[in-house]
């Protein structure tokens, strides 16, 4: 299909203009005008680009693209190699950051809620931090095992909450800074991707458990769901998710 038709669909679905983001959303590097093969992944690292070249992809669709506000604008070194790979092979790079965290059905946070079988989720809009309930209170260790099983890695647990948990707050990626909001909402446990030194003290003093479940691990689910959605809506496309392991 035509690249611009696909981009129009994605922008209509994810509504990037509604977000004040840290990087441009949508098309970041322009390639071929016709798209039949799409590689999806979390981050547009060189390993993902190499897989896209090997698979003869026309588009790479990711959560973490390029041109972040804090990064140098020059196309040198690692950044230059990546851009060169895309342009030499006429591959489009498309990225959606906050829109793919927040989407009410396909977003990282919506998908995490489904994985953990949480109910009564609020807010039910495109906010980033979510609050939900387990069907019944369970020992904290049982919920930790659920997170480990669904994400494929053991989370780092910073204790501070009750022995049994039912109310869960979560936000994918590097959202440890929202722990105070989770505590204000009455959560027993808050899950995000990364951790800071002060998070230990916040968990203890706010009376809430914190689980650092991995930035990469908590953000695989959104781009996977988006790729599956595109495959269902546009059967003429071939979409392949490629997971480049990342322990962070």
Image (tube, grey):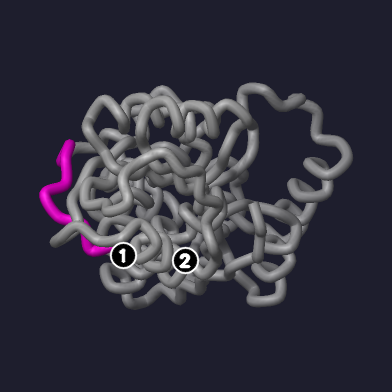
Q: Which of the two discs, 1 and 2, sits closer to the camera?
A: 2
Q: Residue at x 73, y 63 (%)?
A: 47
Q: Which residues are magenta?
A: 116-124
167 and 28: which is toward the camera: 167
Residue 96 visible? The answer is no
| Label at residue 151 | none
Contact, mark 1 vs mark 2 (Cβ under 8 Å)? no
Residue drawn at x 31%, y 45% is 162
| Quarter of the rendering containing residue 246 | bottom right
| Label 1 – label 2 distance at C-alpha | 11 Å
Q: Position of residue 150 (x, y in %)?
A: 41, 69
Sequence-wise first label, 1 or 2: 1
- What quarter of the picture does the N terminus occupy? bottom left
Question: Which residue is identified by label 1?
Answer: 115
Q: Residue at x 48, y 59 (%)?
A: 220
Where 223 sits versus 122, above or below?
Answer: below
Picture coordinates of residue 102 (x, y %)? 32, 41
Image height of 35 relative to 61, above or below: below
The kind of secondary structure element at disc 1 is helix
Residue at numbered disc 2:
148
Query: Where's residue 130, x and y in %?
Result: 27, 40
Q: Where 13 sits versus 23, above or below?
A: below
């Amino acid at each position: 299909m035509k690249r611009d038709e696909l981009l129009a669909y994605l922008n209509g679905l994810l509504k990037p203009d509604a977000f004040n983001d840290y990087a441009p959303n949508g098309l970041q590097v322009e390639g071929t005008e016709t798209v039949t093969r799409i590689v999806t992944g979390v981050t547009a690292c060189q390993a993902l680009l190499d897989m896209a070249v090997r698979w003869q992809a026309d588009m790479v669709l990711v959560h973490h693209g390029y041109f972040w506000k804090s990064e140098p604008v020059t196309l040198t070194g690692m950044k230059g190699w990546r851009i060169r790979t895309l342009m030499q092979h006429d591959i489009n790079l498309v990225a959606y950051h906050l829109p793919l965290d927040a989407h009410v059905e396909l977003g990282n946070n919506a998908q995490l809620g489904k994985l953990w079988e949480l109910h009564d989720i609020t807010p039910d809009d495109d906010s980033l931090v979510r609050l939900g309930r387990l069907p019944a209170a369970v020992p904290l260790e049982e919920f930790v095992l659920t997170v480990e099983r669904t994400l494929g890695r053991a989370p780092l647990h910073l204790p501070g909450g009750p022995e049994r948990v039912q109310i869960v707050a979560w936000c994918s990626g590097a959202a440890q800074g929202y722990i105070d909001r989770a505590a204000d909402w009455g959560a027993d446990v808050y899950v995000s991707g990364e951790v800071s030194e002060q998070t230990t003290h916040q968990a203890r003093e706010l009376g809430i458990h914190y689980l650092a479940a991995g930035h990469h691990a908590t953000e695989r689910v959104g781009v996977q769901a988006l790729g599956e959605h595109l495959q269902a809506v546009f059967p003429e496309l071939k979409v392949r998710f490629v997971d480049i392991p990342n322990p962070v």
